[in-house]
Image (cartoon, coloured by chain):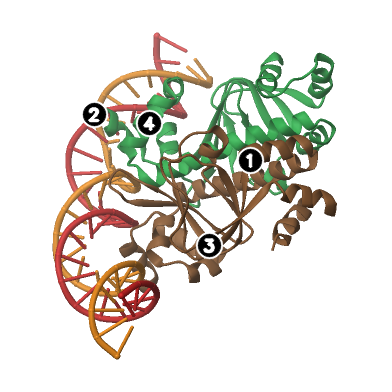
Chain colours: A green, B brown, C red, D orange
Amino acid sequence: MSEILRDQFQKIIAIQPEEFDYILGHFTYKKFKKHQFLVQDGQHVTFDYFLLSGCVKSYYSDENGKMHILLFALKDWWITDYEAYYYQKNAIVNIDCLEDTEVLCLSNDNREKLCREFHQIEHFFRKKTNRRNVALQNRILSLLSSSAKQRYEKFLLEYPSLVQKLPKHILASYLGVSRETLSRLYSTK
Amino acid sequence: MSEILRDQFQKIIAIQPEEFDYILGHFTYKKFKKHQFLVQDGQHVTFDYFLLSGCVKSYYSDENGKMHILLFALKDWWITDYEAYYYQKNAIVNIDCLEDTEVLCLSNDNREKLCREFHQIEHFFRKKTNRRNVALQNRILSLLSSSAKQRYEKFLLEYPSLVQKLPKHILASYLGVSRETLSRLYSTK
DNA sequence: AAAAAAATGTGATATAGATCAAAATTATTT
DNA sequence: AAATAATTTTGATCTATATCACATTTTTTT
């Protein structure tokens, strides 16, 4: 199972088997059922989660209880409330499972320890964060400059597999449109 | 002048004077006049820019020529088109000067070289990118969940100094509203 | 398999914010 | 200091998308 993590490391850095075992020792394995929470609004955030299987969503609930989806994660993706995780704040988002999900959990202390002990691991996380940055920036761009329909069509192209998996009202919330409008977008089209 | 950079390093890592001089040797100094471009849409992006003085904006021009502002940068901030810079693509944004601006330029090769040679520098950039991540995520959140007026008021609180400096139509574009609407937001209020 | 809950679709209406147009103000260049 | 250009304001419309209400379909639970 943990080869999923090893493979991800190896795409970016070279890592010896014994080293990997040592590193893996800093993660804990957990299983969650559909609808269970990895992170809850207002609570302390202990871990960054690397998905081994399943699917989760990260969302913010506004004053009116309306949900706004920030991110999804699938196998091979990392997810947490990074502001809370890095800077020991309380979570402002919820992360819950859209299906049964298995994860490897990494505490911030262990992350920093590994980054200190292995220059390569620090390198790995820098590269990862760079990628995330680019993705976030592109999301902002698309929220600023394109219509609901354009965003929907772009998502369709980029994440066809996710479109299958996701309930439409959840996808709507990610795209920043109401579920009614989304429903009309792909019927009218 | 370069003490601005040294100070920023020192907030995150410990660095010896001779080390700093060596590192600084990997940057080049440049001066830009108001309206000059650091990065242009469609072109190769050679540098990440650390501002010593001045102010720049990064924006995307859509098919209709409408400008959408992604980021500003002031003294002490880093800015470039990161997707183009990290992955050797052509720029999709423009970055130009809102006032005369001085920068230190770091090529991606030199960035990687420094990260290889100094674990501490890799650490520094990881931490920086983490911060940027959090900021970008919060921007997405605010685009998804709050009204133009709320976004304006939040910006007012967070960046009062920028509000002074920026032409209103530029600020409007950052907030994702038309200049007319922005004008009404703060008169009506 | 029935009952309950969740998700989706569709029509009618409301609204935040866009767009168009033109005047007024402010800044920049000659 | 004039002339030119850029920015901001204000009014009149228009429009994409939200909201509300309810029917239908699908999924989950008992």
Nearer the camera: disc 4 or disc 3? 3
Q: Please, what is the three-letter code of the amino acid marked with disc 1?
A: Asp
* Picture layout, residue A155 above or below residue C26: above
Residue that mark 2 sits on: A189
Chain letter belonging to callout 3: B
Percent position (x, y) of residue A156? 38, 26
Disc 3 is placed on an element classified as strand
**Element type at mark 2:** loop
Q: What's the CA distance linking mark 4 and mark 3?
A: 33 Å
Q: Is residue B3 visible?
A: yes
Tell me the amino acid under the disc marked 4. Answer: Lys
Q: How many discs appear?
A: 4
On the rendered structure, is C17 left or right of C13? right
**Where is residue A155 drawn, in percent x and y?**
40, 30
- Per the model, the C-alpha gap separating discs 1 and 3 is 31 Å
Q: Are marks 4 and 1 on the same chain?
A: yes
Residue A154: mark = 4
Have a look at marks 4 and 3 and say if they share a chain: no
Can you give x and y, in whole percent of width and height, for residue C29 in the image? 35, 72
User: Share a chain, discs 2 and 4?
Assistant: yes
Q: CA distance from mark 2 to mark 1?
A: 36 Å
- In three-dimensional space, the C-alpha distance between marks 2 and 3, rounded to whole angstroms, equals 43 Å
Q: Which residue is mark 3?
A: B55
Q: Position of residue A16 (x, y in %)?
A: 80, 16
Chain of the residue on which disc 4 is drawn = A
Question: Which amino acid type is shown beneath numbered disc 2?
Answer: Lys
The N terminus of chain B appears in which quarter of the rendering? bottom right
| Chain on which label 1 sits | A
